[in-house]
Image: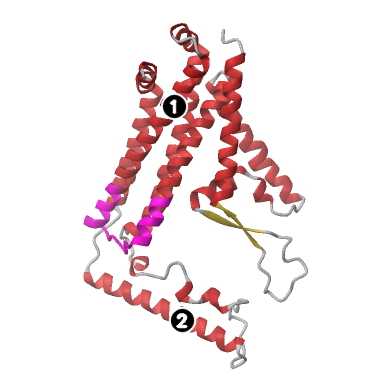
Amino acid sequence: MNLVRAELERLTARRFVQLMVVLLLVAFAVTAATTLAGSHRPNEFELRGAREQAAAQIREMEAAHDRCLRIKAGQETPSETDYIPADCAEIDPRQMERLPVAADFLNGVFTFSVEARPLLYFLIAFLVLFGFLVGASYIGADLNSGGVVNLLLWRPRRWAVLGAKLGTLLGALLAFSAVASAAYLAVFWLIGQTAGHPGYLDGAFWASLGAVYGRGLVLVLLAGAVGFAIATLGRHTAAALGTVAAYLVVWELGARLVLHILDAARPDQWMLSSYLLAWLNGGIQFWDNHACQGVYNGLCDGSYHLGWGSGLMVLLGLTVLLVGGAFTAFRRRDLI
């Protein structure tokens, strides 16, 4: 317990960690101030007009679905502008995840139900970067300066020391990210209530937002563990930064370009970013250019799906592999 308390004190005392927290607060304040300045509380005339527009669009969607059914039944002839899917249920408003609402037609008004998810994605992206950099610098600086060697003189058990560092890092990241995310959403909810429009906040909305919130916290922990592991293997913070930069340039950009030139099937399934997005979004659709070759009737669906399960499996597997390698290397090598 004393080791964990000492590591927590060391982590919170680091100037880089304090700087990153300040940057987060500044970004938070700027985003909130910008949102507040660009929003206003809608009057009854604006709300009534927005409701009418939403109702009109729903009626158009219902008419398009009914026309699709009549065309499928041979009662009408399709025109060039008609979109006729293989199954008319695809354009059935009653089966869509989300119908147009009044908030979609309010101009210059911050609507919490519409903007909460993108804003949460923005915060998660910052926290993932925060977790990776803090994790890498936390162990990298100690390895480079000899601080780990001094710590081992006091507690000469390598795995216990490294485990305490990693556990303290992940616990601190989880607590900080959970509080920061909750406060972030609370501020924008308050803006929606007082200087904007709350939108339609039903149980499905909060469940969806809560799922993104939970998956985002997991992603922050994985990013912190990966940064910690790579810096441990490379014995320096720069090793983690260089590894990520090399991966992005060589594989995410270079290999993606080569696969595109070669017209490879499903190149997105070879990219780590695809699985990251699949986990964070709860699933994601990609297009396979080879699936519909030779099909000319327009009824081919060339999309394929990556679910959150496969995303988590890939991300978790990579993290476990790197952390396991870091602990193995830390136990065997000379630290001086």
User: Is any part of residue 297 visible from this angle?
Assistant: yes
For label 1, count other residues whose C-alpha is less than 10 Å away and answer few (under 14), some (14-19) or many (20+).
Answer: some
Tell me the quarter of the picture where residue 7 sits.
top left
For label 2, the residue is: 62
Quarter of the image with the C terminus is top right
What separation in Å lies between label 2 and label 1 (alpha carbons)?
A: 54 Å
Residue type at the position of mark 1: Gly
Residue 286's x, y, as percent?
A: 62, 57
**SS for callout 1:** helix
User: Is any part of residue 37 visible from this angle?
Assistant: no
Q: How many badges with numbers are in the image?
A: 2
Q: Is residue 327 magenta?
A: no
| Magenta-tinted stretch | 186-211
> Compared with residue 272, is residue 189 higher up or lower down, i.e. above or below?
below
For label 1, the residue is: 167
> Compared with residue 11, is residue 112 higher up or lower down, i.e. above or below?
below
Residue 207's x, y, as percent?
A: 38, 56
Tell me the residue at 52%/18% (across/down): 159
For label 2, count other residues whose C-alpha is less than 10 Å away and answer few (under 14), some (14-19) or many (20+).
Answer: some
Which of these two is toward me, 136 or 126?
136
